Image (spheres, rainbow, N blue to C red):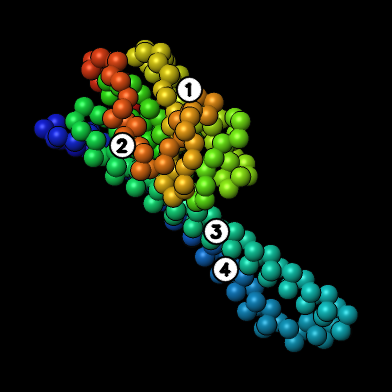
Amino acid sequence: MAGSGSTRATVYNKAGAGVRKMESVRWLAALFVLIIMFAGIYFYSKSSKAITTLGIPVSLVVFVGIIYWIKAMGDKADAYADRALDARRGAVAEEEVGNLLGELPAGYFVVHDFVTQRGNIDHIVISTKGILTIETKSHRGVVGCEGEMLTRDGKPFEKDFIKQAWAQAYSIRDHLTEKGVCNLRPQPVIVFTDADVQVNKKVRGVHILGIKDLQAFLEGLPAWMSERLSKGIIDCLS
């Protein structure tokens, strides 16, 4: 956390920490599956002579079963590895946005990796300009909008990111209400770090930005909230 005399934003937690932990777990899972697979191959090779004594038909059935098992285990290990790579890209994206938010001037408060009952929120920014929940995405391609739907290269995303962003914003509002701080609803923002964002409007009330536009967007917001309330909010969230 930045010191009280700092000229930069006050930052809580480390950006991308949760995703980095997820990446490590998935790599370990992939390694574990590979170890089991190679152990199975080793024990099969040792017992293959004993299996052949059961006759050619039985040996073929066992052999086909082993091949199928090896393929299934290999596919499972690949799936874990792919998810770990996705997590690594996500962590890098969160860290990149986190570094940018950390360069904001004093008066901004930034909370990274905030845990709620509806999942983790990548970043929360609090200042006299209000509350923002920022979700970071590492997807590539061209991000556009068709009606009320976000698209990548002309096709819908695999998830409804807009719905996810609103769920996170409402979870913060509910948390602040339960703590008796205020009943304000944060403004949700989605930031793409590696995509060409060609969205020039809110989509279902959510700002869609490329990382290069994030700083200008934050600077352009009007101040409307008192410093006392902003500090009360950060005291609750931190």
| Precedes in sequence: disc 4 or disc 2 | 4
Whole-angstrom CA distance, mark 1 to mark 3, is 31 Å
Up-down: is 118 above or below 29? above
Tell me where residue 222 appears, x and y as whole percent. Answer: 30, 20
Look at discs 4 and 1 and give the one toward the viewer.
1
Q: In terms of secondary structure, where does tag 3 sit? A: helix
Asked which quadrant contains residue 122, the reply is top left
Nearer to me, 40 or 168: 168
- Can residue 82 be seen here? The reply is yes
Q: Earlier in the sequence, mark 3 or mark 2?
A: 3
Residue 119 percent across, percent down from the top left = 49, 35
The answer to whether the residue labelled 3 contacts the one labelled 4, judged by CB atoms less than 8 Å apart, is: no
Task: In this rendered view, identify the residue nearer to me: 28 or 82.
Answer: 82
The image position of residue 18, as x and y in percent, is 41, 45
Q: For the N terminus, which image quadrant? A: top left
Residue at the image position 19 percent from the left and 36 percent from the top: 8
Q: Residues within 10 Å of mark 4 (few under 14, many from 20)?
A: some
Name the amino acid, label 1.
Tyr
Label 4, on which residue?
A: 34
Tell me the SS state at disc 1. Answer: helix
Which comes before the other along the chain, label 1 or label 3?
3
Residue 191 higher or lower than 27, as above or below? above
Judged left or right of residue 10, residue 30 is right
- Reading the image, the residue beneath label 3 is 82
**Residue 117 visible, this orientation:** no
Q: CA distance from mark 3 to mark 2?
A: 32 Å
Considering only vertical position in the picture, is 216 above or below 169?
Answer: below
From this view, report whether residue 163 is shown above or below residue 78: above
* Residue pointed to by mark 1: 170
